[in-house]
């Protein structure tokens, strides 16, 4: 992928080829297909003709809506922990809460512990926070983690007699549902607007049942302070 090639033209060559290819898919503005990447978003957000890490794939208009949002805040151990029936501890909301809204519950306190990274710089003890969680609450959280396991694992394609939906099933189901909403809106002569169209996209997927409008959120202070700083670095 040439993410660190000193020659920017060589680094962006594959991205431009992909953009040219995607430009041929004009149905619904490209919103009825998706692209899976093997790296976090930051590897594809370098501004054209600018230095720094990565290529400029996601800065080209033809591609932005075609790529599901992901992020570099998450590591493999997050899912290893869930698969091992361990309660994950997060230090930034982007690590899971804002990325995996299709696979994880909106109410993050039901299955995980959130300790803001800034609290650690003020001498907050991780061990003390965890020890202060009542044993009954820990038991409930572990039960919730167990229920999450199917949605964050990949079922082997040859597995027989397995009926649960794995991570791929969940993702495809939600993509199909989103495309269906757009098609219904188009048939009615209107434009459907959802989370992928705006800067506050993550807030749409965190709306409670019955809510339609987004507003201030408890994660605003972490997201805009840290993510904006990372993008400008």
Image (spheres, rainbow, N blue to C red):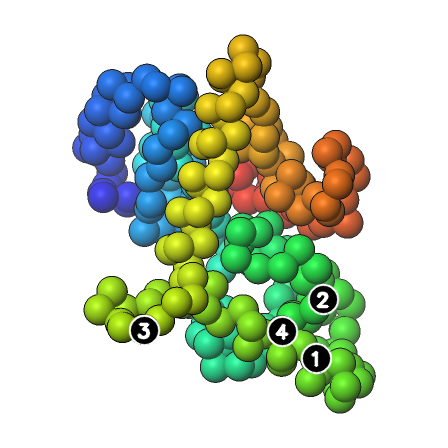
SS for callout 4: helix
Q: Which residue is mark 2?
A: 109
Pointer 3 residue:
161
Residue 144, position as x, y percentages in the image: 62, 73
Q: SS of the residue at dot 1?
A: helix
Side of 119 relative to 82 (left or right)? right
Kindly check if marks 4 and 1 are in contact, taking CB atoms under 8 A apart as contact. Answer: yes
Q: Nearer the viewer, mark 3 or mark 1?
A: 3
Quadrant of the drawing holding the N terminus: top left
Camera-side residue of 27 and 183:
183
Q: Tag on residue 179?
A: none
Image coords of residue 140 (percent x, y): 70, 79
Mark 2 vs mark 1: which is more N-terminal? Answer: 2
Which residue position is annotated with label 1? 140
| Residue drawn where x is 44% and y is 47% of the image | 173
Sequence-first disc among 3 and 1: 1
In the picture, the disc for residue 144 is: 4
Dot 3: few (<14), some (14–19), or many (≥20) neighbours within 10 Å?
A: few
Q: Single out the mark in the foreground, 3 or 2.
A: 3
User: Up-down: is 49 above or below 77?
Assistant: above
């Amino acid at each position: 992928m040439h993410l660190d090639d000193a020659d920017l033209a060589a680094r962006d060559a594959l991205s431009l080829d992909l953009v040219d290819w995607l430009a041929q898919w004009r149905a619904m503005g490209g919103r009825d297909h998706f692209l899976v990447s093997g790296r976090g978003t930051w590897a594809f957000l370098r501004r054209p003709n600018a230095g720094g890490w990565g290529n400029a794939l996601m800065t080209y208009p033809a591609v932005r809506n075609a790529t599901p949002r992901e992020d570099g805040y998450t590591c493999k151990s997050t899912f290893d922990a869930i698969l091992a029936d361990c309660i994950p501890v997060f230090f930034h909301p982007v690590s899971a809460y804002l990325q995996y809204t299709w696979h994880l519950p909106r109410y993050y306190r039901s299955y995980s512990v959130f300790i803001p990274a800034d609290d650690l710089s003020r001498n907050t003890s991780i061990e003390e926070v965890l020890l202060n969680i009542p044993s009954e609450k820990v038991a409930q959280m572990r039960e919730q983690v167990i229920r999450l396991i199917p949605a964050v694992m990949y079922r082997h394609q040859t597995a027989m007699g397995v009926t649960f939906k794995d991570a791929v099933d969940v993702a495809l189901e939600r993509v199909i549902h989103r495309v269906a909403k757009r098609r219904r809106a188009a048939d009615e002569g209107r434009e459907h607007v959802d989370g992928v169209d705006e800067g506050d996209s993550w807030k749409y997927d965190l709306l409670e049942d019955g809510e339609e409008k987004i507003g201030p959120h408890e994660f605003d202070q972490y997201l805009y302070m840290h993510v904006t700083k990372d993008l400008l670095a």
